[in-house]
Image (cartoon, rainbow, N blue to C red):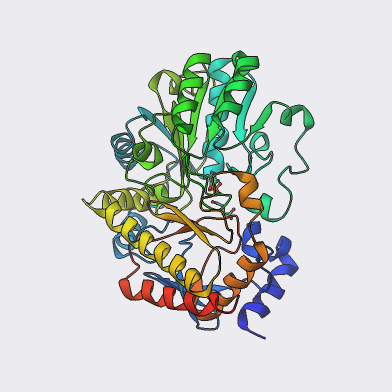
Amino acid sequence: MTQSETLFKEAQKYIPGGVNSPVRAFKGVGGTPIFFKHAEGAYLYDEDNRRYVDFIGSWGPMILGHSNKLIKDALHAQVDLGIGYGAPTAIETAMAKKVCELVPSIELVRMVNSGTEATMSAVRLARGYTGRDKIVKFEGCYHGHVDSLLVKAGSGALTLGVPNSPGIPASLAEHTLTLDFNDIDGVRKVFDEIGDQIAAIIVEPVAGNMNCVPPVPGFLEGLRDVCDQHGTVLIFDEVMTGFRVSLGGAQGFYGVKPDLTALGKVLGGGLPVGAFGGKREIMEHISPLGPVYQAGTLSGNPLAMAAGLTTLNAISEPGFHDRLTEKTNAVKDGFKQAADEAGIPLTVQSAGGMFGFFFTDEPSVTRFDQVTACNIERFKAFFQGMLKEGVYLAPSAFEAGFTTAALTDEDIEFTINAARKVMKTL
Ligand SMILES: Cc1ncc(COP(=O)(O)O)c(C=O)c1O
Ligand SMILES: N[C@H](C=O)CCC(=O)O
């Protein structure tokens, strides 16, 4: 037995399914999840001392790579000052200022502890602001495990076949309308009928929880237009895309301004952080300025702020995202070439520092039904083959992959050589 197998057996005695978040259980690919004990730069090291080139980066936050010295130093310095005070600190304001500078649609921002809290609070605010109950989301998009948003959801909910989770009252779910991602005509049709009842549209501007599906030209612009016409709040869930697709997130990359934005992942530099922010006029409805209640014992805690602000400063270095995108493109082109050489139909898509690959004949994947029609068995075999070769990809065909600044040319070459070898076995 490997150490991971032993540890997984023990974990299952005390933790549901042996994991603290479902996708980690490897149910989407089979086999035993790998237990890690150490990470450095582009690499993860498991309990059996095997090294893996990591393309998950703790599900996105580790954009600088693991155990980054700048972040470790910032954390050590903050620990010496105190771990948390439950009261205002200067670093929270510095963080909020930085977020507002990097994401110009955000005029006021509130820190929370996870992406889930960020989207949950943004939806509550949109409902409180408009006085309407209904919200629109898109099939295959995942916005955390928020009751109103776990309807036809992506990520682990899709991987495990429970996109509509039990435990959510029908009387709540009926306020969530789920439409097709990238279908602006479908959105317009619904808004023509009941637009005046819809509080918010929430969307992942690049869908990263049904693999990686960028918006088709006109989709995000169309959402902006529909929301303007109907007094509906447009929420971009940039928990995954924020500071990753570009320094200004997907909204900076595609040039469409939402009313509210949910952030997480990169924002916390690896610590548990989320945030929501946007137009001053809307954000002023949040407590204590306004009546929409929202709070958090550990919100804005100084350790998370130190790791997050250090990350945001580091990625603000000129050219950071160009270099990250180059790395992503090299991986993307390498996977495609490896597949072509082996005669395996593959489509690879990306946006900045995120990517996804689909075992399909379709030249591009823009719709949810195309995602689910892909060859999942081939994905599983590829995943397992790459794992054996020492490359750690997301353990589900419905998750995006992430590149980090720590990836070297040699790591990318190593990964592409592994892909060449594995593609030939599929
Ligand atoms: C787009 C998106 N929104 C929200 C979330 C929820 O974030 P968290 O897992 O930090 O609660 C995630 C990831 O889980 C995500 O990818
Ligand atoms: N797709 C999820 C977040 O982006 C994966 C993280 C998780 O749910 O554990």
Q: Residue 29 versus residue 292: which sits nearer the camera?
A: 29
Residue at far left of view: 318
Q: Position of residue 11 (x, y in %)?
A: 68, 70
Relative to 173, say whether 15 is above or below.
Answer: below
Q: Position of residue 131 (x, y in %)?
A: 59, 15
| Residue 264 located left or right of residue 352 | right
Q: Position of residue 335 (x, y in %)?
A: 46, 67
Residue drawn at (73%, 52%), measured in percent from left and top?
A: 161
Q: Residue 59 versus residue 389: which sits nearer the camera?
A: 389
Relative to 58, say whether 162 is above or below.
Answer: above
The quarter holding residue 376 reads: bottom right
| Residue 174 located left or right of residue 346 | right
Pick the quarter of the image with the N terminus: bottom right
Q: How many marks?
A: 0
Relative to 252, say whether 76 is above or below.
Answer: below
Residue drawn at (64%, 16%), measured in percent from left and top?
A: 194
Q: Position of residue 312 (x, y in %)?
A: 31, 48
Q: Taking the image as drawn, is residue 154 in sight?
A: no
Residue drawn at (47%, 74%), measured in percent from left and top?
A: 341
Q: Taking the image as drawn, is residue 302 in sight?
A: yes
| Residue 174 located left or right of residue 210 | right
Q: Residue 352 versus residue 361: which sits nearer the camera?
A: 361
Relative to 404, say whether 224 is above or below.
Answer: above
Pick the quarter of the image with the C terminus: bottom right
Q: Residue 298 versus residue 385: which sits nearer the camera?
A: 385
The quarter holding residue 399 reads: bottom right
